[in-house]
Image (spheres, rainbow, N blue to C red):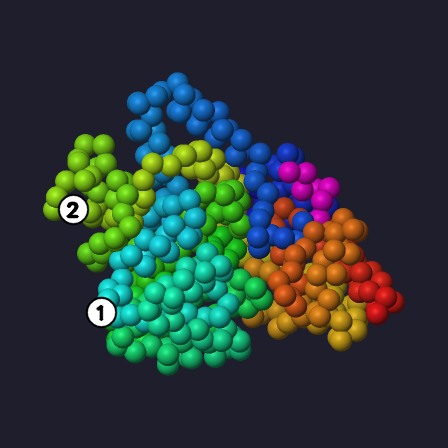
C-alpha cells in the first residue's frame, strides 16, 4: 500500500515510477496519457502464465482462461460500481459496437443519432451503415455545454439508438449533464450507447451517478487502466432479452457443456450474450495483474481522479505563466470542463507537436488541437518541463512565421 496523500505523487521522482522501470517513466516525458499509458512491471507475470496455460495445459486450459476473463470483468465492473455479470468483453470497442448494432431493430427503426466527434471505432461503422439506408443524424459536438440538450432534441420514435461519448476524444471536453439523457431515450424507446473509454479509471464514473444502468457503456484498458491492448468491455443493461445477430459461441449458457449452435438459439442470461468467440487470452492474463497492482497500491478511482486534477492544474498554471501569443496557441476551454487531458487550439498543432518531440516531450494532435494528457506516475517537475518545451517550441515557431 502506498501513500494516499497527493504530495507523494508530485515529488521527484514520483513514488510510483519505481513500479514502471521497464517503461522508464522517470526518464521520459510522455504527455500522451489519453491515448496510451505505460504498464506496471507486474503485468509481465501474465506472459509466463499465459504461456503455461496455452502450451502446457492444452485442452485443460479453459477453466483458467474463463476464470481469468471473469477477473477482468470484475475489474471493469468495480470501476463502474457495477456487477461482473453485466460486463461483456472483447478485443476492441469496435467489436462491441458491432454486436450492439446487431441487436437493434434497424428494419423497424432505421435511424441512429450520434455526434460529429466520435472515435473512428464508432464513427466509421456508423457512416458505413448510413450507406445502407440507415439514416444517420450527426449532431455537432461543439459547444459541449449544450450537447446533451441537442442530442435529446434529435431523437424521435424512428430512432433505434443514440451513440455518444462521455468525453470528446479530440478536444477532451466533458459531455455536461450526461445524467439527464437516459429519460429522453427511454421515453422514445431509444437504446443509449456511451463510449466511456476516456472516463474510466481517471474520473469517478459510477453508472448510478450518471443514470446509465440501462445504457450500453463501453470502454477499454489501453489508456487510463494501463492494461495494454485487447482489453475492452461493455456494460449491458441487465434484465433485457437482447439477441445480437453477431454472436459467437461464447454467447450461450456454457460454451463447453452446451451446444452453442443448437436450435432454437439460446443466449446466456447475463452480458455474456454479447461475448464473442475464441481469442488469444494473453491480454486477460496481463490485465488481472494490473488490476491487482492498482488494488495493492491503493490506487482507487478517487485517488487517481485527484492526481489527474492536480496534474491538469499544474499544466494549466505553467501554460498561463508563459503568456504565449494567443494567435498561435490557446487553452481550448476552462480547466474544469476537461476530462483527463488538456487540449490547446493552435493552427500549427502538428508543427508544435513535432518541435516538442525534438525536445524529448511526447504529445499528440488532432487537426488544430494539440493534446496533453498526464499519467499518475509523472511528477510535477516532468509536467513543468513539458510546458517549458511547449514555450520554447511556440517561440521558435513565431520566429519562423
Write the residue at 19% across / 56% down. Answer: 241
Q: Are marks 1 and 2 in contact (CB under 8 Å)?
A: no
Q: Is residue 212 left or right of residue 327?
A: left
Which image quadrant is residue 153 in?
A: bottom left
Mark 2 closeness class: few <14, some 14–19, many ≥20 residues within 10 Å: few
Residue farthest left in this picture: 264
Query: Which numbered circle lies on residue 151?
Result: none
Would residue 34 be counted in the magenta stretch? no
Which residue is under mark 2? 265
Residue 324 falls in image quadrant: bottom right
* Segment tinted magenta in the rendering: 23-29
- In this rendering, position of residue 386 left or right of residue 166: right
User: Vertically, is 33 above or below 54?
Assistant: below
Across and down, in percent, residue 327 comes to: 76, 75
- Residue 343 in view in this figure: no
Residue 119 at least partly seen: yes
Identify the secondary structure beneath mark 2: loop
Q: Is residue 388 left or right of residue 40?
A: right
Q: Which residue is mark 1?
A: 108
Picture residue at 64% right of the left edge, 38% below the top? 23
The residue closer to the viewer here, 319 or 343, is: 343
**Location of the N terminus (image quadrant):** top right
Task: Assess whether residue 27 is covered by the magenta stretch.
Answer: yes
Residue at figure coordinates x 44%, y 73% from the top left = 138
Spot occupied by residue 229 in the image (x, y as percentages of width and height): 50, 43
Amino acid at each position: 500500500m502506498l501513500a494516499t496523500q497527493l504530495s507523494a505523487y508530485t515529488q521527484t521522482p514520483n513514488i510510483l515510477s519505481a513500479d514502471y522501470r521497464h517503461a522508464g517513466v522517470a526518464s521520459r516525458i510522455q504527455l500522451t496519457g489519453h491515448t496510451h499509458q505505460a504498464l506496471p512491471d507486474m503485468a509481465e507475470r501474465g506472459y509466463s502464465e499465459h504461456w503455461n496455460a496455452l502450451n502446457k495445459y492444452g485442452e485443460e486450459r479453459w477453466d483458467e482462461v474463463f476464470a481469468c476473463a471473469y477477473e477482468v470483468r470484475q475489474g471493469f465492473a468495480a470501476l463502474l460500481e457495477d456487477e461482473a455479470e453485466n460486463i461483456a468483453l472483447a478485443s476492441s470497442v469496435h467489436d462491441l459496437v458491432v454486436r450492439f448494432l446487431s441487436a437493434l431493430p434497424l428494419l423497424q427503426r432505421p435511424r441512429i443519432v450520434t455526434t460529429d466527434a466520435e472515435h473512428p471505432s464508432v464513427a466509421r461503422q456508423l457512416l458505413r451503415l448510413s450507406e445502407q439506408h440507415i439514416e444517420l443524424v450527426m449532431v455537432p459536438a461543439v459547444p459541449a455545454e449544450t450537447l446533451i440538450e441537442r442530442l435529446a432534441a434529435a431523437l424521435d420514435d424512428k430512432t433505434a439508438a443514440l451513440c455518444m461519448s462521455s468525453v470528446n476524444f479530440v478536444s477532451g471536453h466533458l459531455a455536461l449533464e450526461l445524467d439527464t439523457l437516459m429519460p429522453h431515450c427511454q421515453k422514445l424507446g431509444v437504446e443509449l450507447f456511451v463510449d466511456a473509454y476516456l472516463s474510466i479509471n481517471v474520473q469517478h464514473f459510477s453508472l448510478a451517478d450518471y443514470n446509465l444502468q440501462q445504457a450500453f457503456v463501453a470502454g477499454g484498458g489501453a489508456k487510463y487502466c494501463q492494461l495494454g491492448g485487447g482489453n475492452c468491455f461493455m456494460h449491458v443493461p441487465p434484465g433485457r432479452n437482447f439477441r445480437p445477430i453477431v454472436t459467437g459461441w461464447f454467447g450461450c449458457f456454457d460454451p463447453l457443456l452446451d451446444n452453442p449452435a443448437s436450435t432454437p438459439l439460446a443466449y446466456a442470461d447475463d452480458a455474456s450474450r454479447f461475448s464473442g468467440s475464441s481469442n488469444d487470452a494473453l491480454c486477460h492474463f496481463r490485465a488481472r495483474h494490473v488490476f491487482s497492482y492498482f488494488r495493492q497500491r491503493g490506487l482507487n478511482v478517487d485517488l487517481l481522479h485527484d492526481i489527474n486534477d492536480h496534474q491538469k492544474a499544474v499544466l494549466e498554471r505553467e501554460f498561463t505563466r508563459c503568456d504565449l501569443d494567443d494567435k498561435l496557441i490557446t487553452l481550448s476551454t476552462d480547466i474544469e470542463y476537461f476530462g483527463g487531458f488538456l487540449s490547446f487550439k493552435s493552427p500549427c498543432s502538428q508543427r508544435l507537436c513535432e518541435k516538442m518531440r525534438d525536445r524529448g516531450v511526447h504529445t499528440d494532435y488532432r487537426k488544430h488541437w494539440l493534446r496533453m494528457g498526464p499519467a499518475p506516475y509523472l511528477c510535477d517537475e516532468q509536467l513543468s518541463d513539458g510546458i517549458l518545451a511547449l514555450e520554447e517550441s511556440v517561440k521558435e515557431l513565431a520566429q519562423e512565421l
